[in-house]
Amino acid sequence: MKTAYLGEGPSRQGSPIKFVLAAMAMAFMPLGAMAQPAPETPPDATQPAPTDALPTLPTDDLVAPEPAAAPPEAAAPAEEGHTMESAFTIGGMWEAGDFVARTTLIIMIIMFAGTVYIASTKVVDQTVLLGQAKKIPAFWDANTLDEGLDVLGRNSAFRSIAEGAIAQANSAQAGLGARIGRSDRMSHQVGIELERVNGRLQAGMAFLATVGAICPFVGLFGTVWGIVNALIKIGTSGDPSIDKVAGPVGEALIMTAIGLAVAVPAVIFYNLLGRRNKNISDAARHFAFDVDKLMASSAKA
């Protein structure tokens, strides 16, 4: 059987070498595209022209630009109130404080002045009474009442006790007063004079006790009030820096220190003076008892 002519065999079937060359061409085509140079872009009209194109000017016409003036420094804010050096003084606290703070400071100053005045006057008065108490043994060594009264002295508190008993012993009562026995009236009069001596001793002691008890709380009140106002000012100004916080809070804490500085001496003076008052009061009480017994025995005789 005859077959149709299909041409030459090699041209139909293809050579293996051709396939290899085609594969290599396909592989190197991307590399060739990458190796081609990029097309030049047209110059941008917005970009400045190169410096070579500018005309040259003579150096005499070139003027160096003046340096820009430095910005003026911000003015330091004015300090409100007072400086840090005067913040912890009485004058600084007086200037920075409000009505309540100033009133609290005035109260503590009055308490301190009163403490000093009372303590100094009480020391002098107690010294005088102790000197008078030392003459009591000489009174009992006297031979008569008049001699004993002269030994005690004209302004002696102990002489008042003896004179009161003597006056009741020598007085004559009429009416209802005559129904009270003479010894009872003498004892009552001695008790009255003794109460006067004790009242003299206790004068001013209540003030010292009050100052020692409440002055720390007065200072604490000033501290609380000052801290509240300081925090309000700091919150309003919006500046929580340490220099803005230390001054007002430190001033407020000084109020507590002032309160303690006033209260501690008051308590010390109260205890020391109270001890001396007890010694004088005991001496007066013993003397009054002995005088009462002396006048009672004299009345019976």
Image (tube, rainbow, N blue to C red):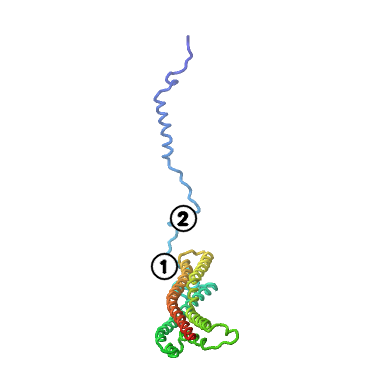
Q: Position of residue 32 (x, y in %)?
A: 42, 37
Placement of 288 over or under 19, stated as above or below = below
In the foreground, 43 or 206: 206
Callout 1 amino acid: Asp
Q: Position of residue 165 (x, y in %)?
A: 49, 85
In the foreground, 298 or 63: 298
In the foreground, 62 or 72: 72
Residue closest to the far top: 1
User: Which mark sits nearer the N-terminus, 1 or 2?
Assistant: 2
Q: Position of residue 71 (x, y in %)?
A: 47, 67
Callout 2 amino acid: Ala
Residue closest to the far right: 175
- Label 2 neighbourhood size at 10 Å, few (<14), some (14-19), many (20+)? few
Residue 78 appears in the rendering: no
Q: CA distance from mark 1 to mark 2?
A: 24 Å
In the foreground, 167 or 55: 167
SS under mark 1:
helix
Q: Residue at x 57, y 87 (%)?
A: 173
Q: Residue at x 43, y 22 (%)?
A: 14
SS under mark 2:
loop
Residue 253 appears in the rendering: yes
Residue at numbered disc 1: 60
Q: Are marks 1 and 2 in contact (CB under 8 Å)?
A: no
Residue at numbered disc 2: 49
Placement of 251 over or under 204, stated as above or below = above
- Label 1 neighbourhood size at 10 Å, few (<14), some (14-19), many (20+)? few
Q: Quadrant of residue 181?
A: bottom right
